[in-house]
Amino acid sequence: MPKFPGPGGLDMQRIMKEAQKMQAEIERIEQELAERRVEGTSGGGMVKAIVTCDFQVKSVEISPEVVDPDDIEMLEDLVVAAVNAGLSMAKDISQQEMAKVTGGLNMPFSW
């Protein structure tokens, strides 16, 4: 059966194959990102948050030196800052990895 190009001379079969390859590659990268961990810190490393590159907070470590019962607000701020630092790194890594597949196209992903 002869192949006829689609609208504008596009080979729809080839386009669909490429889209399937891209989807498989995206799924592979998403799995790798789910396993990759980064560390966000605050307070000079006194608070650490371990975050995966699919944006799951895995753990928070707090050094006893920053625990002041009279200043809980400071500790809360340090935890938020560490988590946000980890999430920011995870976002940067995720965007870089996905850009390798999508060629920089701004595509919606599950993260």
Image: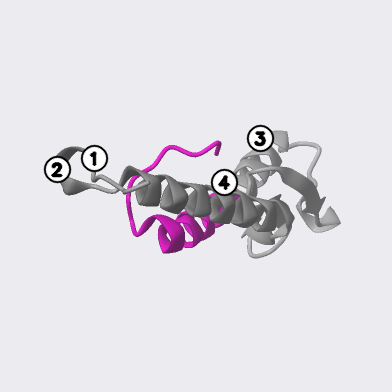
- Residue marked by disc 4: 84
Left/right placement of residue 111 relative to residue 17 reads right
- Residue marked by disc 1: 6
Q: Secondary structure at mark 3?
A: helix
**Residue under the point 78% across and 49% down:** 60
Q: Secondary structure at mark 4?
A: helix
Residue 86: percent from the left, percent from the top?
61, 53
Tag in front: 4 or 3: 4
Mark before the other along the chain sequence, 3 or 1: 1
Which amino acid type is shown beneath numbered disc 4?
Answer: Asn
Left/right placement of residue 26 relative to residue 12 reads right
Tag in front: 2 or 4: 2
Q: Secondary structure at mark 1?
A: loop
Which amino acid type is shown beneath numbered disc 3?
Answer: Glu
* Classed neighbour count for the residue bearing mark 2: other residues with Cα under 10 Å, few (<14), some (14–19), many (≥20): few
Q: Quadrant of residue 90?
A: bottom right
**Residue under the point 33% across and 43% down:** 12
Residue furthest to the left in view is 8
Residue 106: percent from the left, percent from the top?
34, 45
C-alpha distance separating marks 1 and 4: 47 Å
Residue 11: percent from the left, percent from the top?
29, 48
- Residue marked by disc 2: 8
Tags 2 and 1 touching, CB below 8 Å: yes
- Residue marked by disc 3: 73
Say whether residue 85 is visible. no
Stretch in magenta: 86-111
C-alpha distance separating marks 2 and 1: 6 Å
